[in-house]
Image (tube, coloured by chain):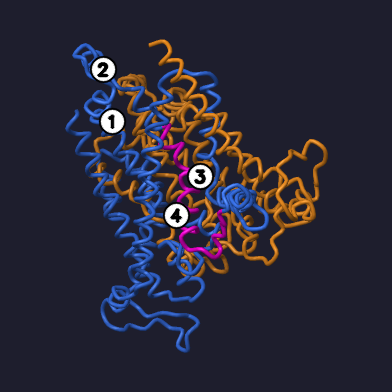
Chain colours: A blue, B orange
Amino acid sequence: MLCLLFFMFSNNRNAWLLLSPTILILIIVGLVPFFYVLYVGFFKWNPLAVDPSMQFEGFGFNYRRLIFDDVFLASIWRSIKFSVVTLFFELSLGFILALSLLSSFPLKSFFRGVHTLPLVIAPIVVGSIFKLFTVQGLGPLPHLLKDYFGYTLNYGLNADQAFWMIVIMDIWHWTPFVTLTLLAGLSALPQDPYESAKIDGANNFQIFTYITIPMMVPVLIVVIFIRLMDSLKIVDEVWMLTGGGPGYATRFTGIHIWKEVFEKRYYGLGSAMSILYLYITIVICWLLYSVMVSRGKNED
Amino acid sequence: MKIKKLLGKIGSTIIWTILTIITLFPIYWMILVSTRTPVELFGKPNLYPTFFEKIHWKNFTKPFIDGIYADYLFNSIIVATSNAVLVTILALMATYALSRYKLPGSESIFFWTMTNRMAPPAAFMLPLFLLFSTVFKFGDFTLFDTKIGLILLYCVFNLPFAIWLLKGIIDGIPKELDEAMVVDGANLFTIFWKLIIPLAAPGIAVTSLLSFLFAWNEYLLASTLTSVYARTIPTGLSEFVTTTGTNWGTMAAVALVSMIPALIFLFLVQRYIVAGLTFGAVKG
């Protein structure tokens, strides 16, 4: 606030006046919660316990517990595994589809329009759609798989099926984003290198690996950055489809925190988890962001 | 060469037809479920489009007329609209400041707003829950379970997004135009009203529509920070999971209704959606 007051009287007064509501709101709903959760993370606090008050159990007590908390560490590992797996599939599928959209074929804009549809659907609705589609007893997918392939799909019981069901759902939901972004990037590429390469007699594969991929790196980094950031946060769809089960099979970090905080009421431990989760996400994103920014600067 | 091209065209069309079926089939099934009675849903799934013959309207009337879901829908509309308006106005002001003035630390402010968008909401639900229900108190009024609380809260992810998107647009308006207006004696308000808003109108429209969409789609924070009075439609949708013996027809109907804004926006902002979702880093 002092800082703000000081600048009120300097010549950038108008700028700070224009910025102040944004900064104020982001402080209230962004910065204050962050420091609050940092603070709560140092206490043992369970409002349902015999002693419902906050107790100080030594510096970093909760964090020391978390280091040996297998379930929490497994949930982080699961989230990272999920992000990498979905990223791999979405990126490769999206790249192929984007390349195919560069040439013209009948009904292209219709196909593209339908492909955009999943992007705007809420995650929770995507979860519902997949629940209706794949749940035992109602959904057509288990029936079709059973009748034509003799494969039993019951992700309520099978842990691997549950995990891969979430992966498939995420691919269904977010491949269009990758496709459209890469398509935008591909259409903006300069044509000269392609022409020179063709004159020099390069084949399609060489053109792809030596021209398309290197020129697409900035767009690819943006896509990877946004997809990783969002898939590390995944909660809604999973909550709707499997509720984190069966067992711990789809308990991603967000869901794990939810269960610890709102079912078991481990406020202190949950805060420490939130901080670690935040830290891991920010570190991964920050690394990619700095790569993104430094590449952008090199180009200028 | 010609044959190769023709084969490529046929191949692309076939692949895209299959993809379109994969995309639309689950949605088609949801529509089917929403038009059927529980008895009709029992047993082997019938994929025949029965909604041309008869629709079980009770799936829609039960939650939205007899039930509480009309309130949820109303809350969603209020929260998403107010949030979109608030975010657009604030972001326009903030972006103008970041774009036109040389501020000490404007890069850091920019990055800080960005981290708000990167942070996973699950990490913030506990502190926000505690702050909203116990700390942010004004007499009897707490932010917990109020629409105001949600409207302010959604600024966390919508404001950074809107600032990112608008920055590219406002940077594109030449500074000389503002300076010319200042020389003519215009104040800041006139500059906004007569210059920035008309020139950036398409960008502003896209920003507010996408902000509306994100606020409409948000689930996790809405479900932890509301209990009765401010519940939005996504939280209502999730309530179907916990009840025993889910009424699938009603659930499909609610999901279908909550998809409507998304479908409308698809037609309005399809061209800008790539720029929107990549914060303008990739032009669509």
Whether residue B257 is visible here, answered yes or no, is: no
Q: Is residue A233 above or below residue B214?
A: below
Please name the amino acid that badge 3 sits on.
Phe
Q: CA distance from mark 1 to mark 2?
A: 13 Å
Question: Mark 2 or 4 closer to N-term?
Answer: 2
Say what secondary structure mark 3 lies in.
helix
Residue, disc 2 = A194
The residue carrying mark 4 is: A234
Q: Is residue A200 visible?
A: yes
Q: Are marks 2 and 4 in contact (CB under 8 Å)?
A: no
Q: Quadrant of the N terminus of chain B?
A: top left
What secondary structure predominates along the stretch shown in magenta? helix
Find the magenta span and give its range: A151-180
Disc 1 marks which amino acid? Met
Indicate left or right for B160 with A202 as reference.
right
Residue nearest the observer in this picture, A187 or B85 = A187
What residue is rendered at 47% in x and 25% in y? B12
Q: Amino acid at mark 2?
A: Tyr
Of all residues, the one furthest to the bottom in this rendering is A50
Q: Secondary structure at mark 2?
A: helix
Quarter holding residue A57: bottom left
Check disc 3 and report the residue beneath it: B214
A62 to the left or right of A105:
left
Residue A216, disc: 1
